[in-house]
Amino acid sequence: MEDEECGSSLSAENAKGPLYTENEVVEVHIKKPAVVIAPETPLIDVGRIYAIVENVVVVMADTAEHQKVLDAGSLFVFEDREVMGE
């Protein structure tokens, strides 16, 4: 089958791997930041590690307190202040 607008072939024989949307981010490589957390730096407990699936860490939030949001740039550290990653 030929897509008339794009001129590309949409047949199953031409599919090589999973399909993705045009703007989908497949995988982001993030290096462990070279950061040292000083003993006087306050840490905010946002939850517990619920699961690790391949390269994704799922955090179960502690919602008893005010709402806390994690985003790009949030830094994960262990209780001993060792940096896990960003």
Image: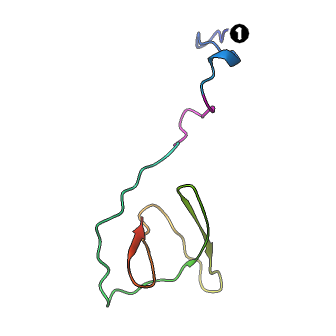
Q: Residue at x 53, y 37 (%)?
A: 23
Residue at disc 1, secondary structure: loop
**Most common secondary structure along the magenta stretch:** loop
Residue nearest the observer in this picture, 78 or 21 = 78
Residue 52, x across and y down, in percent: 59, 63
**Where is 23 relative to 79, above or below?**
above
Is residue 35 in view?
yes
**Where is 9 relative to 29, above or below?**
above
Residue that extends furthest to the bottom in the rendered view of this protein: 40
Q: Which residue is drawn at 29% across and 84% down?
A: 38
Name the amino acid type tagged 1.
Met
| Number of numbered callouts drawn | 1
Compared across the picture, whether 49 is left or right of 1 comes to left
In this picture, which residue range is highlighted in magenta? 17-25
Residue 72, x across and y down, in percent: 45, 61
How crowded is the residue under tag 1: few (<14 C-alpha within 10 Å), some, or many (20+)? few
Quadrant containing the C terminus in the rendered view: bottom left
Where on the picture, by quarter, is residue 58? bottom right
Q: Residue at x 60, y 25 (%)?
A: 16
**Where is 39 relative to 68, above or below?**
below
Residue 42, x across and y down, in percent: 39, 87
Q: Which residue is drawn at 62% across and 76% down?
A: 61
Compared across the picture, whether 38 is left or right of 70 comes to left
Quadrant containing the N terminus in the rendered view: top right
The residue that label 1 is drawn on is 1
**Where is 42 relative to 86, above or below?**
below
Residue 49, x across and y down, in percent: 58, 73
Residue nearest the observer in this picture, 52 or 24 = 52
Where on the picture, by quarter, is residue 84? bottom left
Residue nearest the observer in this picture, 19 or 24 = 19
Is residue 10 in view?
no
Compared across the picture, whether 47 is left or right of 76 comes to right
